[in-house]
Amino acid sequence: MKICVLPGDGIGPEIMAEAVRVLKELGLAFEMEEALLGGCAVDATGDPYPEATQKLAQAADAVLLGAVGGPKWDNNPREQRPERGLLGIRKQLGLFANLRPAILYPELANASTLKPEVVAGLDILIVRELTGDIYFGQPRGIEVRNGERFGFNTMHYTESEIRRILRVAFEAARKRSRKVCSVDKMNVLECTQLWRDVAIETGREYPDVELSHMLVDNAAMQLVKNPRQFDVMVTGNLFGDILSDEASMLTGSIGMLPSASLDANNKGLYEPCHGSAPDIAGKGVANPLATILSVAMMLRYTFANDAAARRIEDAVKKVLAQGLRTGDIYEPGMKQVGTREMGDAVLAAL
Ligand code: NAD
């Protein structure tokens, strides 16, 4: 197991330290090497995704990432912004499938802003296409036309791009409740009419999985109205960006949510859903559980070690049941702990 570790910026290094401790505690044989990505890489080399990092990431079986970005780099030229590093690594590694579970742990039911009876037991998997769509489409830009500034982007998908992400969703659904909801905007956007057509065609390969379709505006409403109707949701890059953040907020605790981005051979990049939280960076208060749970996803999806993944997930549940909480998920009556203490508790539970 070759693992490339990219702590990144802000709280990245703090939460990654705990995740690495948890990984080491499992006693599995792996090689691990650290490299720079994001703002720290810009500072050191001028490039958010430097060549040394590219080599390491390409040679690894899996990449563990903390988070990148921060106000320090917000006014840099675009190619020197941390987020460019993130888009760059996803594109270069061909990580086209982003898997984001939104699970509400019973112990954290009050953390959601929705009523507990609406969200209790929530367990959704959002599958987002990650390397296509309007985020990468050409032509794009801002130029002057007819005497005024004109901004434009291009949404496009090939049918093979759509089919491969739909297959990831159907395969994932087979391991869950066998329901896939495909989200599009076929009433307005031709590109997503193709999405729906290909979803229907691909669905015929999976007669054991129930396929439904929803327009993205309705999906955004249904997620807050009746989120438990969903099992696996699959959608394009732009809609998935928004819906996956919405779904993660149903749980009320972004500090708890891991994610996986996979290529066609289950090589993956694993990272928490949250960003680099510059407001709390360096204070030792960040919640490391999303990153620790990302290690569990890595063991499950890239290294096919479900038992080790479960050990981590069970340890996290145990720590929550013990009443330990970082500030982001704190409730009166619980014991507030910092990043390190939370890591210690997970190690002890392991
Ligand atoms: P953010 O997720 O970093 O923070 C949002 C809020 O959640 C903040 O109040 C933060 O303190 C809190 N938070 C986030 N993670 C936490 C954790 N583990 N424990 C406790 N609290 C936590 O989002 P933002 O503030 O919009 O963005 C900050 C920076 O992160 C920006 O530069 C942005 O571009 C970048 N970003 C990076 C990624 C990534 O690396 N994948 C994703 C999103 C945002």
Image (cartoon, grey):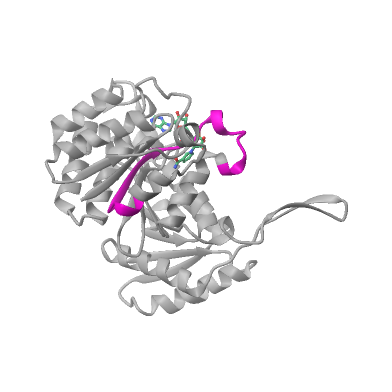
Residue 70 highlighted magenta (yes or no) = yes
Q: Is residue 253 visible?
A: no
Residues 25 and 73: in front is 73
Residue 180 in percent (x, y) is at: 39, 65
Residue 234 sits in which quadrant? bottom left
From this view, report whether residue 37 is shown above or below residue 192: above
Image quarter where the C terminus lies is: top left
Where residue 73 sits: x, y (%)? 55, 32
Visible residue check, residue 307: yes
- Up the image or down, 12 lies above or below 187; here it is above
Residue in the picture at 44% in, 68% down: 212
Residue located at (48% from left, 50% from top)? 88
Left or right placement of residue 313 versus residue 185 in this view: left
Give the magenta range: 57-79
Relative horizontal placement of residue 181, taking residue 316 as reference (left or right): right
Question: What is the x, y in percent for residue 215?
Answer: 55, 63
Q: Nearer the viewer, residue 294 or 214?
A: 294
